[in-house]
Amino acid sequence: MQSRVPSKITRSVSMAVSTTLALAIGVSSTSAAFAGELNILTWEGYADPSFIKDFETKSSCKVSATYVGSNDDFAPKLAAGSGVYDIIVPSIDTIGQMRLAGFVDSIDLKKVPEFGQVHAKFRSNPDVTVNGEVWAVPLIWGSVSVLYRTDKVTQPNSIKVLWNPEYKGRISLWDDKSAIYWAARMLGYDNIYDLDDTQLATIKARLIEQKPLVRKYWSTAGELAQLFLNDEVWVSNAWTGLIAKEIRKGGKPFTVAEVDPAEKSEGWMDSMMLVKGSPNTDCSYQFINYMLSAKGQCGIVGSTDYFPTNPVSAKTCLPAEEARSRHLDDPGYVDSLVMWQMPKRLDAYLETWNAVKAAM
Amino acid sequence: MTPRQKRYWLGFAGVFGVPLVWTSLFLLIPYAVMLAVSFWTRKFPLFVPDFQFGNFRQVFADPQYLEVLLRTGKIAALVSVFALALGYPLAYFLIFIVRTAKVRNFLYMVVIVPLWVSYLLRAYVWKIILGTGGVLNSFLMWTGIIDQPSGLFLYNQTAMIITLTYIFIPFMVMPIYTALEKIPPRLIEASHDLGEGPFWTFLRVVLPLSWGGVVAGATLTFCLAFGDFVAPSLVGGPDGMLVANTVQTQFGAALNWPLGSALSTVILLLVLTIITISERSERYGKIDLD
């Protein structure tokens, strides 16, 4: 057993080294063997080698992915200078901001023949299609629910579990403006994307009140999985699917479950957008089409456990049972979620969340 | 221009040209840009050039920024105090107690060598030590002091102070070591000959003569800790946001570069003030040896 200790440390150290490298380099270098290269600013699990390798071989476009931990990471990264990324994959509440800030080009639908197969609900979203022009190609969708350790936390039925003093020091929360949405839903507000100043002040107070209970705000899927695996936290809000999957892979003696609280879970949909002035549009369109195809849809579903946006192609590769659990034929499931929208006063939301984090 | 003058200027440009260009390109111009942006205005979806003092007003009027500045000052001061409390006796031990140069150099290297390891890695290691399933908890449980792993060690301000003290202690030891090394042993002998015991010799001879090292070390550790943003994100908890994280947030998620620039300008002025004060106090502590 003695030998296990160093191996654990070695693993942690090598993880730290790779974190360092990832922070230092950000984007991995490209190989000369590829005809083109594609830099994608996206989410963990969305550029998994299990399906990206196949795309690279077919298209000879080399994919380099950089991961965001929050939708609030897109604008700063693009504002810092163009020419780095070719495709970004923001969520539905952020695509409008990308368009308005002039960061993206519209999509030439002639080059995306399978666009029409995408769930109509997503295609016709007012931020996806604006005045007949399409700005984003829906890629994948899912929810944000409550994730908890079954051996430590009794199945919660409300968001209030994240404010339960019984779990003091074992609670985590996504470091994202959506923290405001969570507090708003707990308080029973139904205008969560159009909160007024009084409501924001109440929310701020509730979130500050929660701080002594919170062990750590998480900012990436990997970080939250580690917090669970290292026995640091027992309950958190989480992207349904990916994180629980990561934790189960960790081989710990406990298990985790996800639950939709009575106040509903949040829904999101991530879309591919073309960064303005990218010279690699050829590779970009190949990528968009690949991701809408059976290989891309089932590949990303396999690596994330989220729900496909193109039921036509996903049906050809998902087993019938999984097709049901992934809501292939009932996009109406969206209606049971509180779908993300861009807050009317984004600045006020961001300021409130930052004030919460800065407070004691 | 005479050939002599020409030679002078050619030599001047050859020796100082590149460093001066480098300094202006990577230090002076960025400072000027930062100052300029601090007067801009945040306007959805980005921000627009402007000249107004609203960002500075916000930094001083909104209590959250003052609170973060005070918290950062407190953490940085505690880090300096702990680094001094550990670093001074260590440097003293190396210079005055250790007799052989070989042992002294070896011990000095032991203190300095962590600087060769990536800063991020050293901070990360503390997560492994202090975590619920970490080395410290395993040890305490093995000794029977506690029977349940404690969550008290990680993700709070204490963890940040421990980590930052560990990381910055070489910056305290180095200047104190150098200052102590320069003290002629005959001065200490003279103090003893005149009947002073070790306590007063230390207080009246050694400490004043090494004061410059103490001030330099304290200034370095304070400023380094004041500007740190890695420790809060790795080992800090929800109550551990430091001013550098606030700046990072303004340039990141908040997308308010003007406010971030104003905040950075305030921090720059604070640090310059601290350096000025420390320079003064360094002069103040000097003893005339002539």
Image: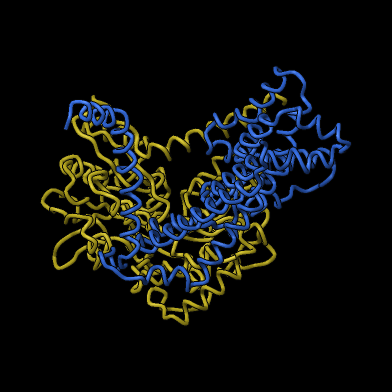
Quarter location, residue A107: bottom left
- Which percent across, then down, holds residue A110? 10, 51
Q: Give the vertical position of B203 relative to A10 (above or below).
A: below
Residue A355 placement, left or right of B101: left
- Which percent across, then down, holds residue A44? 41, 45
Quarter location, residue B109: top right
> Is residue B42 in view from this perspective?
yes
Q: Report the front residue among A357 and B272.
A: B272
Q: Which chain is blue?
A: B
Residue A269 placement, left or right of A137: right
Residue A72 placement, left or right of A216: left
Q: Give the vertical position of B19 relative to A181 (above or below).
A: above
* Shade representing chain A: yellow
Q: Report the front residue among A107 and B142.
A: B142
Q: Looking at the image, which residue is at 54% across and 56% down?
A: B242
- Which percent across, then down, holds residue A306? 40, 52
